[in-house]
Image (cartoon, rainbow, N blue to C red):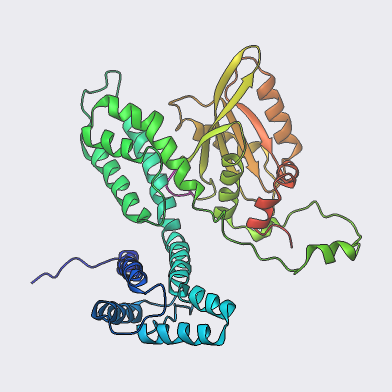
Amino acid sequence: MSGAPSTSPLMHALEQFDASEANISKLQALWTEIKALIPSGISFGENPEYDDRTRAFAEILKALPAIDGWKPTIELLDLNDIGQNRFDYADLGEPAAAARFDADLALPGRELREYRFRFDHKRRALVREPLITLIDSVDVSLRQLREGLGAEPPTTMHGDSWDELRGYIDQIGVLMGSSIQRPLRWSDLQRHLSFGDYGDFRDIERLDWPNVKAALRAGLYGQNDPLPVAVDDLGALVMQKPTGPVTTALNWAALDDAGFERLIFNLIGSTPGYENPEWLMKTRAADIGRDLSVTRVVNDALSGTSRSRVVIQCKHWLSRSMNADDIGPAFTQMALWRDPPVDVLVLATSGRFTATAVQWIEKHNATLGNTPKVEMWAESHLERLLAARPTLIAEFKLRD
């Protein structure tokens, strides 16, 4: 007798977050009702509705799990206790103390908001890596669908690849939950997936997915999360008048291969003039790295706007330089990304280029008709780019 399909650890975690979120919503709704039942002045007597709601509030609060060891510690006062405190403050002629007491009555709402803030932060951390994987999978699916269309596209999209794409989008919807705001074109994306005509596919490819992907990525890298700072007062630091040489070299050893690729992705994704960055492979091939694709936009006041497709190969090499023999496989890799054609190949490395590699690239670029053109982003070039982007240096811990 076969049992029910096993639940993945991620799905189990999401279920715990879903149950906790339901309890948060119940507590917030109950608190709204409880507040409305608290008299505005001095009052004594029982209110069964208030008592029932405070009991329910206490039971649900018990079921709320801690977040990093913290959870709200809320004790709701009896209505007679509230009336007695107000009476005592009025009798003593302490209006300031009475005002503080009334302000403290709102403390449960503040603690619930604090818990909700921490909850959303933790849920985003939980789904960050799975979302990144699914975003990459959607990119691959769209590219495979485009490559499989042929000269005469069908009227209706169907088949395993289309179903796979819909499945990825559905999973993204589950991962977003309510902690990640729906992107502007999310409903358009859902509608076009539902209709499934070729025109819908084109809208998904050109309009919906670039907007959704950009919005999702914008919330995945902790822009609102604090980075550790080793001082309490920056003014005191300046008063010390620190001196000494300025280090320009970065600690590339702090990154692994995936971290280097993510750094380059964030670099192009945060730089004006670059649009729709995406991964070109689900997983890194051994010693090749994951290719990145991005559209480079050049605005010229006289000739208008031009766009070129740029593919970036990331080589996180700490112990050797890139030589001429390494460039051939890079060009072979370009044959995989022909639709649309690649205009520029960027070789980004945490190492350097040998003299023979530089000569090869310069000769290639100088030969009329050779495509794609090749750009070298060596260690020194990347350090100059990142010097103007200290937030990336801090986020990726590139200073010793």
Residue 186, compared with residue 178, is above or below; it is above
For image coordinates 31% across by 65% down, the residue present is 18
Question: Where does the image place residue 396, in percent across and percent down from the top left?
Answer: 63, 56
Question: Where does the image place residue 333, in percent across and percent down from the top left?
Answer: 50, 35
Q: Nearer the viewer, residue 362 or 350?
A: 350
Q: In which quarter of the image is the N terminus?
A: bottom left
Q: Is residue 315 magenta?
A: no
Q: In which quarter of the image is residue 297?
A: top right
Residues in magenta, as a range: 281-285
Q: In which quarter of the image is the C terminus?
A: bottom right
Apparent side of residue 242 relative to residue 288 in the rendered image (left or right): right
Q: Which of 385 and 19 is in front in this view?
A: 19
Can residue 22 be seen from the camera position used here?
A: yes
For image coordinates 89% across by 62% down, the residue present is 242
Q: Nearer the viewer, residue 188 or 86?
A: 86
Question: Where does the image place residue 238, in percent across and percent down from the top left?
Answer: 86, 61
Q: In which quarter of the image is residue 312?
A: top right
Residue 358, compared with residue 3, is above or below; it is above
Residue 206, compared with residue 398, is above or below; it is above
Question: Where does the image place residue 139, in percent across and percent down from the top left?
Answer: 40, 39
Q: Which of 13 and 28 is in front in this view?
A: 28
For image coordinates 21% across by 23% down, the residue present is 155
Apparent side of residue 396 relative to residue 150 in the rendered image (left or right): right
Most common secondary structure along the magenta stretch: loop
For image coordinates 36% across by 56% down, the residue present is 178
Apparent side of residue 101 relative to residue 271 in the rendered image (left or right): left
Residue 220, compared with residue 354, is above or below; it is below
The furthest residue to the left:
1
Apparent side of residue 245 relative to residue 42 in the rendered image (left or right): right
